[in-house]
Image: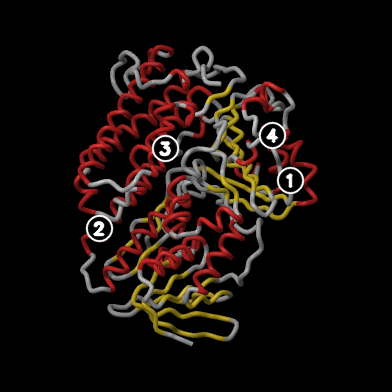
Amino acid sequence: MDSAFDVAILGGGLAGASLARQLQLEAPDLRLLVVEKRQHPVREAAFKVGESSVEIGAHYFQKRLGLEPHLRSAQLEKFGLRYFFTSGDNRDLASRFELGPAAFPPVPSFQLDRGRFENYLLRTVRESGADVRDGCRVQTVTLGPDLHRIAIASPGGAEEVTARWVVDASGRAGLLKRQLGLARPSPHGANACWFRVASRVCVDDWSDDPRWQARVPTRNRWLSTNHLMGPGYWVWLIPLGSGSTSIGIVADGDMHPFHRINRFERAMDWLREFEPQCADVVEPFGDTLEDFLALQHFAHGCAQLYSADRWALVGEAGVFTDPFYSPGSDFIAMSNDYATDLIIRSLAGEDVSARVESFNLTYLRLFDAFTRLYDGQYRIMGNAQVMTAKVAWDNACYWAITARLYFQRRFRRPEFIASIEPLMRRFFVLHARMQQLLRAWDLADHGSSYPAESTSVVDVAWLRALQASLGAPLKEDDALRAELSANFEMLENFARGWQAHASRRHPTIAGFITAATETSPLLFRELLLDPVPVGR
């Protein structure tokens, strides 16, 4: 058995196995070792949480890793993100304001059965030549100037291997992060619990109201990542290709204490109080319960992800923000892209010190920007008006700047990122101020209620075009910089429009973003719920 490798990947889950796949595609001659503590194949459905992907992660798996045949045949294409806001006692889904598409979005994403997907990935990288050792544990990692030494415990006994690069993909265990003292707390204090039932939970069946059914005549709501929204919380319902359904509660720890949801019986009691229709639907499936897990203060940070001393942290071994908007696979895609770039260049003899500095800075700035989407924002989740503005704004930022840079493969181009530094600084400031506006708007809007209507972000022409254009061919640098500048100008106008609308209703918040101005022509009334939404 070989004991000398170019790259040792500690962890064969979603981050580690997809990194091995990417390295095999971009540098097929590398000697790869993947050490995975679980014996494979693992069970389907009730394996890991994080089943919903969005554009960056889906594109990474589908196009960059060439996994589209598996995604199309063994997983489920997602019917977008869908939100139902609090109405009365939450016993009638049709009476709740609905934010979600009536058709599949132009750029696809997928619901992932993690057990099925990770089995396929690990089998693929093994068949492609990687040395995959499952059922093994990493005991120690000794970093050296030329070679790193990894002590591995397996059913057959102990062994030491060497590698020129070592990548920590061990998830929350964070082997290298803990060893190097890189862990940093996150200010975001939400908690979560989740479970899977071995049945299809179909929200399309929750109401027979013909008007409600007519909004999505294809009856594809169940393929969405469905969110049941309330003050301080959201509940997810995600279908899996194996036929099971993933159900989770994510809540602000101050408004909904962890002890209310940290056991299945307690979680069901919580659902009966806050989401009784969901509790009534789920209760008959109790006999098919496949698992139950809970996690307190799930968000975590990290001081450094990449080193010129030939080590890296990818996936949750580095950072984690929040499952709202499903960014987990996005961060895997970006962290793996950076690790792949550094590994290939350094093993070819290139000095990667400057790239390491750039990649760490950019990745941690994105982590901070994503954290601002969630930290302190759970209190507004029951407000249909403010959350519609937030979802529209957050998605517009993602499609206009962040996802565009990934689809255009510029995150691996430090010189390009440096060339747009002034724009990115303005973008991050605008983004932070909009989140402040949303919090202030919710406080001023306390007690407002909105009718049982519906709208969709991707039904607004310019937002749908923004998402659809992610799949455009690669652009020259000057053309992309011009596009990013134009997109930022649109975002500024969009922010001014929301601020103007909010300040007309609540003059005390007129000072946010900019002085109150006339509504921009880019502010589409389909997204405004004052007095009733136009979008249907």
Q: Nearer the viewer, mark 1 or mark 3?
A: 3
Residue indicated by mark 4: 204
Q: Residue at x 41, y 70 (%)?
A: 24
Q: Nearer the viewer, mark 2 or mark 3?
A: 3
Marks 4 and 2 close (CB-CB < 8 Å): no
Label 4, label 1: how far apart the Cα atoms are? 26 Å
Q: Residues within 10 Å of mark 3 (few under 14, many from 20)?
A: many
- Residue 22: x %, y % from top left: 41, 64
Label 1, label 2: how far apart the Cα atoms are? 48 Å
Q: Residues within 10 Å of mark 1 (few under 14, many from 20)?
A: few
Please give left or right for residue 321 compared with residue 201 in the image: left
Say which label, 1 or 2, has the lower sequence index.
Answer: 1
Residue indicated by mark 2: 357
**Type of amino acid at the residue the image marks with label 1:** Glu
Say which label, 4 or 1, has the lower sequence index.
Answer: 4
Viewer-proximal residue, 470 or 252? 470
- Residue 346: x %, y % from top left: 27, 70
Q: Count of labels shown?
A: 4
Residue indicated by mark 1: 265
**Type of amino acid at the residue the image marks with label 4:** Asp
Say which label, 4 or 2, has the lower sequence index.
Answer: 4
Q: Nearer the viewer, mark 4 or mark 1?
A: 4
Say which label, 3 or 4, has the lower sequence index.
Answer: 4
Viewer-proximal residue, 439 or 422? 422
- Residue 462: x %, y % from top left: 39, 28
Q: Residues within 10 Å of mark 4 (few under 14, many from 20)?
A: some
Residue indicated by mark 3: 467
